[in-house]
Image (cartoon, rainbow, N blue to C red):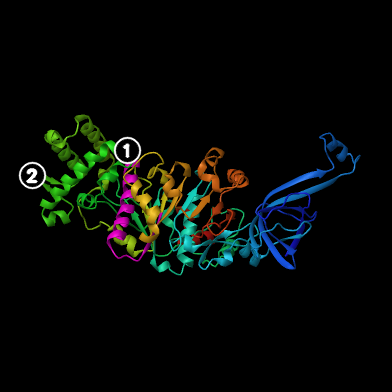
Amino acid sequence: MKKIGYILGHKPNTPYEFHFLVDKESLVQLDDIVVVKSIYNNTEIFHYGIVREIIKYTEASQYAIETELIIDKKIPYINITAAKVFVTRIEPEIYVPPEPSSEVYLVDKNNSDIALYFDKMDNKIPIGFLRNECNAYLNLDFVDGTSGAHVNITGMSGVATKTSFATFLLFSLLQKSPYSNQYRAIVFNVKSFDLLYLNYKNNYRNMKNESSKDLEEKYLRLSLEPKPFNNVKILVPPKKNKFEIDTPDSLVKGSLYYFTLTEIFKKELFKFFFVDESKDFQSLERIISIVEKHVQYLLEKTDKDLENQGVIETSKGYIENLDQLFQYIKDYLEENINKLNESRSTINAFLRRFKKVKEDCNFLINKFQENKTNIVKEIENNQLTVIDVHNLNEKSKLFVVSSILYLIYLKKEEENDTNKYFFVIDELNKYAPVSNDTPIKDVLIDIAERGRSLGIILIGAQQTASQIDHRIVSNCAIRVIGRSDAFELSKSFYTFLPEDLKKRAIILKPGNMIISQPDCPVPIVIHFPYPTWATRKEEVLNEVNIKKALI
């Protein structure tokens, strides 16, 4: 290990933090990990810590004007560099400050693991690199629900690389966990077609300031194979104008997903059409329940063959899409308004919203056809399922995400399913806002509070974590912060971040994240490598790319 300075004697040092004088020839940076050996009563005590603040000043200079005198060498001076360190670990656990004038060293790999308790993690997965280029880890037990569960990722759109980090986390999880054969990951693709190419090797066309060889060596240092995702299933919705699969090109081998009316009402998914009506949902909840119960009654009277085809039988004919359902429900409510004990204004408010639902979501509803994908079965049979929702309007997008999460939730409650399901959900604040209720919010809260026992893990991402119900974020064992704005960082949610790291979060570059996990007493800054899987069509490495490169 390299000596970089001495503990200062004129600064107050405690068991929690200390200050040291940096040697003139040494380079010390924020996030460097250091160790100090002190001797108390013939006992060696090692203080490990992370550099959190560095200051430079001129000794013996008291006035601003003296700067000119120093430059002209008219008065004696000496430039000083000092650093403040947050203590992360003391071995043995004798809680005393380090001795003044003790030597301070930059740690090596083994001591990095000790300083951040990586050595105490029985099950761990690599998550990137520390400032000193040593591997950084997450405790797997606090990711997959063994001891804790759930990950929350927050940061500004476009520069915080939330989705990139979430996919890298899944990549590490699926490769390095000894229990990965029981893992099922579900990712909702919300931005362009970016995540539909995860099963292709990256050609590194968009990578800057690094060679492909150096990048792949980084993956090997993390004990990860530099390759694309394996065992991937792509689910794609139908086109809006005609009922066929909506894929961008032949590289995406997607399967068509949609819903039938019978499964919507048998699985009680109808309420998820109104997820975005968070402010008005309580006033609509009763009438939504009335509609659900009436249609379920119709289903009981429907011939089983028709039900299996996704068709509902009524006294006025057959219903197989939202247009037909809207007209039937409108007539039913108007004919039975006196029996339902509901005001006309409430019924009209519901019908206005239902009309918008059928206009926005009808293309997702059809009777059963040969090409229909069983969404739950596909998720169960594939290690990673990417569900494309980026081309959907807001109502249909919220319906799809909420419904699929709820279907897996029901499956875990009703069946003896030993798989663990990892849901990557972007824009989590839309499903569980802090102030209003939505149909899916109670499910998300239940998953956050007892997801460990259910076997459902949330990897939620959003720009502003302060806008999510605190019962969800407070149950996330792992918290990740990308580049964020100062106003958001001033909210109470971020009290776990020291003030210096709040300042860092404002200037973090893409690929750098602040990680807080139960094992480490303070959050740490890491950087994770560029993906070896394609994140868009032009990054796909295939035979065509190779031929072009050779020409």
The answer to whether 515 is drawn above or below residue 330 in the figure is below
Q: Where residue 192 sits in the image (x, y, percent)?
A: 42, 47
Please state if 463 lies on the left or on the right of 5 as rendered: left
Which residue is labeled 1 in the image? 277
Please state which of residues 295 and 509 is positioned toward the viewer in this rendering: 295
Please state which of residues 188 and 502 is positioned toward the viewer in this rendering: 502
Q: Is residue 285 magenta?
A: no
Which residue is labeled 2 in the image? 315
Give the number of the mark in front: 1 or 2. Answer: 1
Magenta span dominant secondary structure: helix
Quick one: which residue is furthest to the bottom in this view? 178
Please state which of residues 126 and 100 is positioned toward the viewer in this rendering: 100
At label 2, which amino acid type do we have? Ser
Q: Is residue 314 visible?
A: yes
Q: CA distance from mark 1 to mark 2?
A: 31 Å
The answer to whether 416 is drawn above or below residue 518 in the figure is below
- Give the residue at x 34% y 66%: 418
Quarter-of-image position of residue 87: bottom right
Mark 1 and mark 2 lie on one chain; the one further toward the N terminus is: 1
Please state if 97 lies on the left or on the right of 113 as rendered: right
Q: Where residue 400 sits in the image (x, y, percent)?
A: 32, 49
Q: Is residue 388 visible?
A: no
Magenta range: 394-423
- Residue neighbourhood size for the residue with mark 2, other residues' Cα within 10 Å, grouped as few (<14), some (14–19), many (≥20): few
State the quadrant of the N terminus: bottom right
Please state if 283 lies on the left or on the right of 10 as rendered: left
The answer to whether 485 is drawn above or below residue 188 in the figure is above
Quarter-of-image position of residue 357: top left
